[in-house]
Amino acid sequence: MSPTDSLTFTDRGGSAGDPGAGHAHLGVGRAHGKAILLGEHAVVYGAPALAIPVPQLVATATARRLPGPQDGADRISFAITGPRTSSVTPLASDDLRHLVAEFKERTAVTGRMSVDVLIDCAIPRGSGLGSSAACARAAVLALADVFDRSLDAGAVFDLVQVSETVAHGRASGIDALATGATSPLYFRGGTARELPIAMVEEGAANPPQWSNAKADATRPWGFDALFVIADSGAGGSTKEAVELLRRKFERDPRGRDAFVRQVSSLTNAALHDLGHGQLGDFGARLTENHRLLREIGISTERIDAMVEAALGAGGLGAKISGGGLGGCMIALARDPNGADAVARRLHEAGAVRTWVVPVGRFANHAI
């Protein structure tokens, strides 16, 4: 089974293969951020993980084909900008170069490629919110659009994964999928399924229609809550964290096995909580997962303080989210007033910014 056999993703804008794609030599692709709920790092060693899209954090890539001779070396340039800056910064990264080479081979683009790709990314880099995967996904879709190539979900996943593997050294695939998903994901062993929990895109009028063929996908789960994500302001490094744990687990394989076993148990129990609307139990598993991540050296004092602040403000659970060694944490709130209280306390504890991701009956709550 391919990583996306059970999924149909809605790639926001710039659909590859649409009539007129590449018109005026422009192509557009979009993706969004993600947050890991449970399972980061253990997922690399075979444990399951749960992730949630963060649709208000968008990455949009615009690819422009340039005129020129059809022979000679390819000329591909990448640059990035964002909502907090008026500057454009060139990107000369190995991960995107590998992506382009794989894209050209997979889509049979012949002749010289001469393209400028500008990525407008609202996802903070080094935050653990999937900026590298979202930028890669947006770039893949923009290239497919400008070259009038149709890519199915599996092909998009494979191309993003090429970039992610170079960027992080060892990539489970969850970011490559979650940055294009429309609802929370349960991921294990390279495969994923979207869970029938309502989420609404920014600007969308109606809840999503789930395309998962599973019988329970037609019946939304009654998990009604809000997730509060907070940026510590200290950038993390997924690649550094992955390498740190690789060395640690090589020295202590029993410790690795115990960590993976405990996280697997927590994540599977959390999946049950999601399906039965058990917010308190789910929150407790978030906090326990944080304890395990702190014990293996992935958290920081600032993140730990923010976790305690969220719990002190009435949050049902809280943990670091993503690669760690900095970046973001995530907390669970029962209702909008609770989310506001948690967000205020997190800012008091040093968060530089927060985002609220409502799910279930709160999906239409203003964010």
Image (spheres, grey):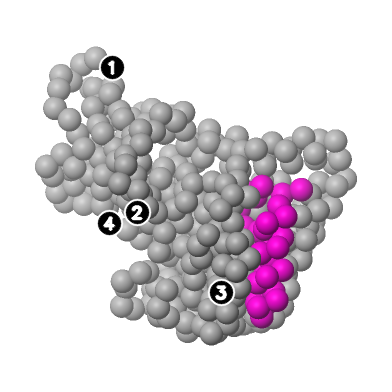
Say what amino acid the circle numbered 4 marks: Gly
Which residues fall within the magenta stretch?
297-325
Q: Position of residue 334 (x, y in %)?
A: 59, 82
- Disc 4: which residue: 13
Q: Give the spatial CA distance, label 3 vs label 1.
A: 53 Å
Mark before the other along the chain sequence, 2 or 3: 2
In the image: residue 110, left or right of residue 49: left
- Disc 3: which residue: 344
Residue 83 circle label: 2
Q: Residues within 10 Å of mark 3 (few under 14, many from 20)?
A: some
- Residue 262 highlighted magenta (yes or no): no
Closest to the observer, 147 or 151: 147
Q: Give the spatial CA distance, label 4 vs label 2.
A: 19 Å
Say what amino acid the circle numbered 3 marks: Arg
- Disc 1: which residue: 73
Q: Position of residue 359 (x, y in %)?
A: 50, 76
